Image (cartoon, coloured by chain):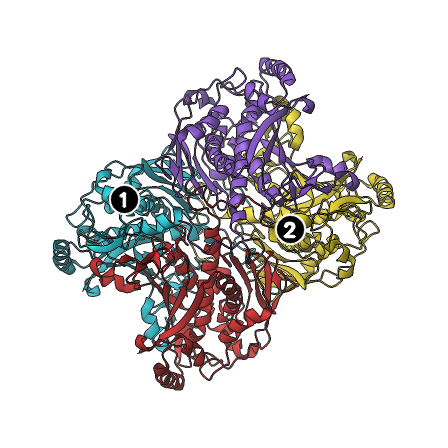
Chain colours: A red, B cyan, C yellow, D purple
């Protein structure tokens, strides 16, 4: 299994299974001189951490991250940042019964077929626990981007059939409810849905939106490493995500060109002297950022870990029934919000470094050949 | 601009602007011994080629591809395959007026801002013409995959508000109408829509579906290079695509786990002895192929090249109005079908080689250390 | 600082400074099913470990490696293998004085200039300590390669002006003396040299040779990822290495074609039915392994950490004199032997997986499309 | 065969066989705004071109390079630069006899074993002809680097037993003799050697030196992507190269630390206020450029294409004798000089872009977040 790294210049490589000794990763490419401490990472880890409300799994994961390298006297040195999170609350016993029957909708069966072996405890490498390292690394990317004026924020905008009213959108609200939703009015409806789903032993999907503001014009490398293409990969790589949209997304299929082109007008108040009158493009044209907010949405499927019996097979291909009784989130999409933010941050940090590497119109602005020390 | 290559082991690197001397590319990683000739590539190029029906641009592009290397006596040698398509029908005059006004919804403005210069003729590198090389390379990937029993097919399933009836789906129909649609009954409705859109000087979006059958269990590299993540990147990298779905896609957000997990039952007729009772996963679980058909959908936005006036700016940030009068497809999504097939083929060929590189349960099946000659 | 990873399919990414909390790394691509435990790694780590003879630094580094993931019930799972070595014997005080004066011949000055900050304790990231992770990862690569019949061994063949007599070469001797030298008769001469160098407070360079036997024909990807090119990079990336040779190496410059071409004769006892009559090529032709032993040599410079005063500058560019009094190896080349073995093992493991990924003459031998489980 | 590309941000991908329709490549990452025309590339191609003196092969290769993309109105646009060189003088007949007997010392046999097929005409992909594309691409890198004050120059410093006197070194002399040697006094001795070797139907090796001046402090990415490691790979990837040295090279093995550390003294005339008193390091410490000249040497083996009979085998492993009668260089090392320059230029251009991508001490000097247009 290669494929555990993402990013060209700002790069994260991760390791770890949910019930092994630890999970962790290496962040390469973070420039020197950025003030950084473990608390910067812990903040987002705590947002992602389970057991914080009655709507997420009761599994307690302190998720304390340690920075093992790359920071000296409170400041990054330009060397790789080693991250480590020890696994502590490993009730392996809970998972013994799934050793011998594949959970439908999980990666159990394909891992067994691909590798001929799997760490069956809690999903192993395929567990959502793996995303904790993404969140820790994403917090570094966020702090880096913040220095340049880029701000990333995510929100849950629908769960099952319940959707928010965008007219109520208030970013401050996102951190004030257990759903990361910006619409306070939707909270009771989400609560009611969760109670119903939990009572049924079922699970439910979710729709998330992640945005980045303050992104300058020019990030993104056509043709294949377009900013939207790299975002699509980064977001689709999150467990349980089955769809990714940029800007108007899937809805463009039913649209007309006369209604969907984002018109431009002169506007001296803008950094580039131009204002867009709409943002169907979601901040990206031809794979390159336009300076407008970058807007992406992702659909997270309902977890297959449910208390409702499902048909499956055993390793010797005998029919069986699977009921998952462990401590599971009825809606894994909720905790995917900080993960989605992290993946957008990692992608933008990488493209920001790539963007920096090239001079504009040559040779104007060429200052790269003088020492940076 | 790096970012012109895609794939790790089976890799395509492209170059070329729509109105320069030529476009082309290099295909690396194609195994030796595959029978290959230019006609194999031309077939898909002809499917993509404009000017074939009254519903695509009248621009004539013979799009004759030359194989410059990597094939000897009709068979691939394992060395890189150089591809070249000369640009012939370059009516540069058509584009002179767009030199001095940025077309809204196009990449003109961001290219100018990012690079400080752009080949303004016909979109330059951002032109859909660039996708011809993808199609040529994808044809090689398709032929390689066909040897292993993998078959890739794409179709248009909606255009604007007109959608097909999936009950009418017949793959054979796809090559029999100018829309690449599998529902013969939808053809007149698509025609009517096109006539209306064209008369209005407008354009319309489209929804495509691409599938791969015969894919074995085990393709895909968790965690970041998941098969679905790499597919999302590959499909989102196509011009004008704003959304990508795998399996049930965005709809999983409103689903419940009890309805969306794909149950498994023993089935001796299947290669792995297991049959899935549904395919919400679109053939991919945990980033790894399940052996079921791989199903992806993509939304293509309506082109911004329309005859309806739109507000824009000039290079010196003066307000202006843009009307695009050139020869343009009212629905670029139609010709995106072979492009989407190509991107799926390239992605699967790459993962098929990656899949091959690792032994199963060790040391069983280890035959890699004997000479392959 | 990106650039902390090496390898395409079998890939090592490392992190860590000599006096931070820990060093470590991630090994990706190791196939599933390989029996592996920490003791497999510890063996080579102990060979590299300082403080084992009076000819290496007295610094005590227990160098206990922990495997944090990727191994389940004693067998690799195909997921990334996280490695961790805590730093324990960190007498930071020893290094306080080098904070304010750059050691000539070290990376101190360039790190300060490049990053504007450096962890000055013991060389930080540029310390030879970083190579411990390479050795741990290399041990995994060695074990993988051993399953296919490949064996890697290194030796010290010269130190300063003292060279071995190749007629005395006995591989068994290598592990029986503190110099990793295969010529028992040279040991007293190396000892005498070391005593003299140490007494003078000086240091001395070394010449190493690393070989791999049992490598099949066909490893290596022309044109740029040639096996010899990748070996050259891997070996030159070791601290203090200034030259790399393959086969007859630099000496080919003075040779004649009639004497240096390796003639071939039929030989039914060989795997490919052919025997070479010499090995000037060092087992690699056109970037591809020939089946003969792969032979590389590398020159390790004398460490600049010496007790002899040297002119240098302070951070504010004032002249100063530097004398390094810490615990240092008079010949760092000795302990570079297991590091060189590790780098060759990592390179071969990577190319072995790349080699496996491609079928031979197509479609013969195509078995990749059946499930590997 | 993947592995046909080199470089991360400034990247060259090549294709082509010596006797196919054409060779060519794609250069990615060249910044926009660089004035560039075909004549810039042709100059170095002409230096490499055979048939220019009686000491190189009589094969006539006009080697006219075409730029197919990435340049608009005489200036680079930031998009990939497609390069094409048609093969014209293909006397395939010359090579018919080598179809059925493997030339010892060539890549024929390993290609046949690895791929099961080979384009046997003139070495196919393994022909030195492949290096023409490197030279063309290297000329772009050189022009880019020249804008920043970096100048690259190569020279032949030994051939067989004949070596130059470094006291006679004059760079201007290099372009005035057919050997690219900087010592005018050595020219008659090289001529005499060549006459002797040619008369004997033999060939001879060569030692080259390549330098780069004007390189700022700070290029190079520790730990694995060190500037010296990447140079070693780039130079070792050239056909027939068997050894690479940086600075004092292999000789460091016999040196003492007290003599080999490059002392530093304050010197206000230098860009960084520091002068080095020697350059054993060859301009690179810890993998990072020091600001001193970068100095590399490479040994090129004598070609195996000689008129002296050598034992070999046929494809069915029958013993045979090979005599190469074609038009071949008695010393391929001569024409390797522009190739070595090209590989150093490509490596430095790539690291120069990587260097640019990271801010120095954060947040000072952060100007990357403003538009570059």
Residue B222 point in image, percent of width and height: 48, 61
Residue A203 point in image, percent of width and height: 39, 78
**In the foreground, C114 or C89:** C114
The disc label shown at residue D188, or none: none
The CA span between labels 2 and 1 is 47 Å
Which of the 4 image quadrants contains residue D246? top right
Secondary structure under badge 2?
helix
The disc label shown at residue C111, or none: 2
**In the foreground, D226 or A233:** D226
Q: In the figure, D372 relative to A304: above or below?
A: above
Residue found 73% across the figure and 43% down from its top: C155
**In the foreground, A145 or C353:** A145
Q: In the figure, A55 relative to B139: above or below?
A: below
- Residue B37 visible in the displayed image: no
What chain does badge 1 belong to?
Answer: B
**In the foreground, C261 or B93:** B93
In the image, is C342 to the left or to the right of D322? right
């Amino acid at each position: 299994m290669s494929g555990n790294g993402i990013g060209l210049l700002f790069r994260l490589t991760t390791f770890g299974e949910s019930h092994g000794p630890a999970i962790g990763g290496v962040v390469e490419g973070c420039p020197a001189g950025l003030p950084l401490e473990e608390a910067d990472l812990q903040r987002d880890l705590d947002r992602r951490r389970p057991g914080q409300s009655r709507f997420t799994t009761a599994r307690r994961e302190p998720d304390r991250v340690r920075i093992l390298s790359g920071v000296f006297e409170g400041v990054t040195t330009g060397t790789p940042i080693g991250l480590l999170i020890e696994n502590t609350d490993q009730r392996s016993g809970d998972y013994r019964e799934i050793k011998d029957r594949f959970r439908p909708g999980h990666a159990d069966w394909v891992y067994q077929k691909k590798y001929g072996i799997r760490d069956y405890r809690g999903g192993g490498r395929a567990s959502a626990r793996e995303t904790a390292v993404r969140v820790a690394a994403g917090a570094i990317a966020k702090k880096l981007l913040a220095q340049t004026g880029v701000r990333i924020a995510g929100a849950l905008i629908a769960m099952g059939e319940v959707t928010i009213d965008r007219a109520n959108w208030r970013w401050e609200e996102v951190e004030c409810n257990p759903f990361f939703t910006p619409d306070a009015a939707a909270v009771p409806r989400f609560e009611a849905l969760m109670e119903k789903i939990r009572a049924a032993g079922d699970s439910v999907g979710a729709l998330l939106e992640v945005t980045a503001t303050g992104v300058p014009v020019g990030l993104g490398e056509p043709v294949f490493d377009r900013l939207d293409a790299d975002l699509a990969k980064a977001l689709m790589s999150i467990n349980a995500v089955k769809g990714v949209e940029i800007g108007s997304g899937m809805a463009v299929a039913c649209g007309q060109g006369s209604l969907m082109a984002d018109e431009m007008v002169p506007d001296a108040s803008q950094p580039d002297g131009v204002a867009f009158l709409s943002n169907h493009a979601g901040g990206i044209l031809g794979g390159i950022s336009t300076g407008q907010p970058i807007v992406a949405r992702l659909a997270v499927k309902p977890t297959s870990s449910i208390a409702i019996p499902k048909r499956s097979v055993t390793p010797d291909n005998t029919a069986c029934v699977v009921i998952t009784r462990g401590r599971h989130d009825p809606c894994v999409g909720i905790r995917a919000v900080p993960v989605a933010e992290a993946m957008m941050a990692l992608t933008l940090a990488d493209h920001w470094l790539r963007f920096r590497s090239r001079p504009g119109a040559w040779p104007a602005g060429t200052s790269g050949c003088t020492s940076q020390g």
